[in-house]
Image (cartoon, rainbow, N blue to C red):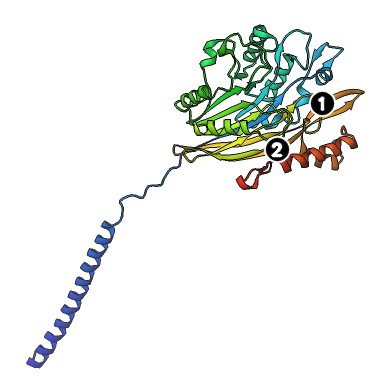
Amino acid sequence: MCYVHLVLYLEHMKKILLFFCFIATAGIFFLLTQKTLLADQPAEIKSVEIASTEVTVVSVGDIFLHTNNLSAAYDVKTKKYNFNPAFSLVADYFKNADLSTAWLGGVMATSGPYTGYPSFKSPAALVDALQNMGLDVAFRTNHTMDFGIKGLNKTTQILKERNLNQVAGYATEADSKNIFIYQKGDLKIAVLGYIYGMNGLPIPKPWMINLIDLKKIKSDVAKAKTQADFVIVALHFGNEYERYPNKWQKSVVKQIANDGADMIIGSHPHVLQTVDMVTSTDGRPVFVAYGLGNFYCGQRMHYTDAGAILKYTIEKTNGVTKLKSIGFVPTWVAEYKEAGKTQFKILPSKKYIDLYKQGKAAFLSTANFNRLKTTYQETVKHLTNLKIGFLESE
């Protein structure tokens, strides 16, 4: 090989060597860069789990038996009472809920004579129907002592035998100290109840009846909050037939909210009262339904034949419990003739307005349908509260 050729060959090899050096350097740089980027990334991306439990609840107002709906439920052939038909069209609301409450008026018994106002004594068949419907909690009322200690004891026995939980009236001091708590998963709900009075009738032992005593309620709520995540306080209070809460009701509600209650529901006036959201001193919004009206009774005066099913959901998510949603279903107690006999039945109002128009509620007369429409419109107008998002529900 001549000298010139040797020089050219060496120059060519030099270029090839430089090229491979460049490639090697670029590769090392790339690997180092990738290593740095990978080092900045977390070793494992973990998903965040949300632990959530929901409890659906329905609450209704007063259940009383007057002489007219006592007679309607009596079968002269069998000589027995049957109240199942009266509750049949609303039973699904209770069966589909996790927890349900109502105010049970009067004394329950297994032998007559059965009576309506002013001293209520009702057959145990009423409790059978409530059990079949799916009721869980029976709040007691101002008629709990209508037949004294014997009446209270017999009522307690009948309720216990049918697995209904009695709140606000007690046959033993030990029972009076227990707080009813419903539990689903990790969510616990405490339910307390109190009554304004016993219509002047004596209360032999103070523990037999939970009266509206703000000092006691404060103590009970504090105790309940150590055992449960959410506390519902039920009050039997207010002036009869008044559609709006009075100053005393508002004052009582405000104090109980300040003492820690998470929700307050009321009954006694026999008509629906308005709802509101009060703010406690510690800044919590506390829903209050001042009066849920009559759910089932024989009263036929204006507004007394209409009621509402309060439907709500309580949610616990990652340790925080709140009232997730709430609404209402208007109801009406229909009085109609069947085979020549007067009958009573609770109707979900909107559903039966629609069914009647479709020709599927033939048991209702034209007068009944017109009354149903009127009570439905009155209930929706009276209860709807756009400010707090309280609306009619399905």
Where 140 falls versus 9 (above or below)? Answer: above
The residue at 47%/28% (across/down) is 225
From the image, which quarter does the N terminus lie in? bottom left
Q: For the residue marked with disc 2, what is the amino acid?
A: Val
Residues marked 1 and 2 touching at CB (< 8 Å): no
Q: For the residue marked with disc 1, what is the amino acid?
A: Phe
Query: Toward the viewer: 172 or 218?
Result: 218
Query: Toward the viewer: 95 or 29?
Result: 95
The residue tagged 1 is: 344
**Left or right, 112 with reference to 341:** left
- The number of discs equals 2
The residue at 28%/61% (across/down) is 37
From the image, which quarter does the C terminus lie in? top right
* Percent x, y of residue 217: 52, 24
Where 389 falls versus 169 (above or below)? Answer: below
Q: Is residue 360 visible?
A: no
* Percent x, y of residue 258: 50, 34
User: Counting other residues with Cα less than 10 Å from the Cα at mark 2, is it few (<14), some (14-19), or many (20 or more)?
Assistant: many
**Left or right, 393 with reference to 228:** right
Q: Secondary structure at mark 1?
A: strand
* Percent x, y of residue 161: 63, 13
Q: Is residue 330 visible?
A: yes
Name the mark on residue 146: none
User: Counting other residues with Cα less than 10 Å from the Cα at mark 1, is it few (<14), some (14-19), or many (20 or more)?
Assistant: many
Q: Which residue extends farthest right?
A: 340
**Left or right, 191 with reference to 358:** left
Q: Secondary structure at mark 2?
A: strand
The answer to which of marks 1 and 2 sits earlier in the sequence is 2
* Percent x, y of residue 105: 70, 20
The residue tagged 2 is: 329
